[in-house]
Image (spheres, grey):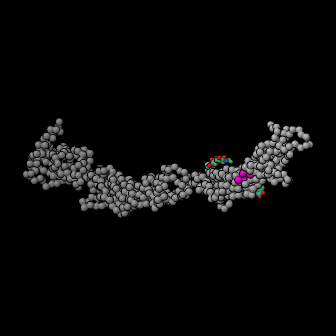
Amino acid sequence: METREAFVLWKRQVLILFVLLGLSQAGPELVRYSVAEETEIGYFVANLARDLGLEVEELSSREARVVSDDNEKHLHLDLLTGDLLLSGKLDREELCGSKEPCVLHFQMVLENPLQFFRAELHIKDINDHSPTFLDKEILIKISESTTTGTTFQMESAQDLDVGSNGLQNYTIVPNSHFYIKIRDNEDGKIYPELVLHRALDHEEEPELRLTLVALDGGSPPRSGTTLVLIKVLDINDNAPEFPQRLYEVQVLEDTPVGSWIITTSAKDLDAGNYGKISYTFVHAAEDIRKTFEINPVSGEVHLRLRLDFEVIQSYTIKIQATDGGGLSEECTLLVTVIDINDNPPEVIMSSITKIIPENASETLVALFSVRDQDAGENGRIVCSIQDDLPFFLKPTFKNFYTLVSEKALDREEKAEYNITITVTDMGTPRLKTQHNITVLVSDVNDNAPAFTQASYTLRVRENNSPALHIGTVSATDTDAGANAQVTYSLLPPADPHVPLASLVSINADNGHLFALRSLDYEALRAFEFRVGAADRGSPPLSSQALVRVLVEDDNDNAPFVLYPLPAQGGRAGLTW
Ligand SMILES: *[C@@H]1O[C@H](CO)[C@@H](O)[C@H](O)[C@H]1NC(C)=O
Ligand SMILES: *[C@@H]1O[C@H](CO)[C@@H](O)[C@H](O)[C@H]1NC(C)=O
Ligand SMILES: *[C@@H]1O[C@H](CO)[C@@H](O)[C@H](O)[C@H]1NC(C)=O
Ligand SMILES: *[C@@H]1O[C@H](CO)[C@@H](O)[C@H](O)[C@H]1NC(C)=O
């Protein structure tokens, strides 16, 4: 309560004081004191009464008091002792900011009579503030191509203290790439500048975290820090790089379309667009572009078209990787096509004789060549025919073979041969091709007609009617065609007295024998002759057979008297 009353009173008197201040000159005496800021309340500054040459008793009687220029009650005058004491903590920074020296002006006022004494209290700075940065983190983007020596302005720290307690120095840790250059400004302040002294490399260190330390000059010094985050901006200083210059891959010929072949993947140390790689075929011939495709983003190579070892055995493909900045590199992809046994062997007939004469030895039937478009074992061929045939294969020139009959053939035994030429390759699986040839054996007249019997016996009853068919001879010829066409004939009788031509005749075509006239047992009981059968070959072959004709008796004669002789024609008597 007391302080409140005192305060009200003091306030009123201050008003008066100011009025008076405006009017009257204060006394000439100026006393100076100093005190460190933040000193405890009640600190003894000085004995003001003594310093001003006043009696202590006067102070109470004349209502002495101290009044600060700023109306704040920093000081207290002990009226009993005349001691000037601190009545509050003094904060230099609050009172004076950055102004130096920091002086608190106050007066001691006495009444009856009114008297002023001017005094100053110097408030000495203590190092009670650390340097501080407004931002806890500072971001700086620096291109990796920046040359050393380049400087970057940095935000400065604040230290409310002054003089040597104020900001004195900056450092940066670590200082691998940068150091701090202190720049003095016209206003007496110092500013830090970041100086690059070792080139940055985005690929090595895309960002750096540094600590900027601001130091004041106090004892001990105080410091403040801020994080400096340096983003190293990439420039396209790296071309894409393939891990290998040559890729080799073997691809089976029958690899399905769309299959993945290989991935050629380049690396680019640059970031962002400069590190973005696209892949293309370069200087690629039409066949490469048709057969393969590359994914521009992933570098994967796929098959677009079926491979054919028989057409192209290998492809040399140049692949280019280009980054977003246009730098590029090439690698080579060697695709070797591996043959698979996809081609059956082939038989190519050069000449063929479909009909060979019988009885001719080693006759050429066919001349042919074989081939297989596959490689290696897949293209190695063996050639055979059935082994139960009188033919054989004879390898001739290169891949030519002849098919030859091994001995004289006999048409009559076998007139037709079906020959299967089998060509097989040695691949896996084995492929084979067959070629059928039908060989006909043509006839040679090597067989004479043969009679069914070596001799024929025909019986004819006498008195036959003329031109009676009395029997047949028959001969067969195993040859064919004209060589087998038999013609029959009567051969001249051994006994020239036999009137054969008047007795019998033979049908040349079918061997039927006819009696030309009525035979008379009593006159001719038997006779014989030879028949011939000839074929129409060239030259013709023939054979013979014996024909015996027996005339059988008929009861055509009545008993008769040998003498006298009976009359002619009596024979026409009785018949069956
Ligand atoms: C500032 O600090 C650096 C490194 O700590 C030191 O080399 C330099 O002498 C200091 N400068 C001042 C003005 O104290
Ligand atoms: C045919 O074979 C016969 C024997 O059977 C022989 O006498 C003849 O000379 C052969 N002909 C040819 C053309 O070889
Ligand atoms: C030969 O083949 C043909 C047709 O396949 C057939 O008609 C004929 O009987 C065969 N000949 C032989 C002797 O196997
Ligand atoms: C060849 O003949 C064989 C045996 O007669 C038969 O199995 C095959 O199908 C024939 N091949 C051709 C191409 O006619």
For this orientation, the residue located farthest to the left is 23
At x 17%, y 48%, the residue is 70
Q: Which of 179 and 47 lies nearest the eye of the viewer?
A: 179
- The image quarter containing residue 11 is top left
Query: Can you give x and y, in whole percent of width and height, for residue 301 in the image?
Result: 48, 53
Quarter of the image with the N terminus is top left
Give above or below for 64 relative to 362.
above
Quarter of the image with the C terminus is top right
Is 66 placed left or right of 137 in the picture?
Answer: left
Observer able to see residue 529: yes
At x 67%, y 50%, the residue is 418
Q: Is residue 486 magenta?
A: yes
For this orientation, the residue located farthest to the right is 563
Q: Which of 494 and 19 lies nearest the eye of the viewer?
A: 494
Count of numbered marks: 0
Is 165 placed left or right of 418 in the picture?
Answer: left
Observer able to see residue 459: no
Give above or below for 199 relative to 220.
below
Q: Tell me which segment is drawn in magenta.
A: 482-487
Query: Can you give x and y, in whole percent of width and height, for residue 314 in the image?
Result: 54, 58
Q: Is residue 135 magenta?
A: no
Q: Which of 379 and 221 lies nearest the eye of the viewer?
A: 379
For this orientation, the residue located farthest to the top is 1
At x 13%, y 50%, the residue is 116
At x 84%, y 54%, the residue is 496
Query: Can you give x and y, in whole percent of width and height, for residue 90 in the image?
Result: 24, 47
Is 483 placed left or right of 379 in the picture?
Answer: right
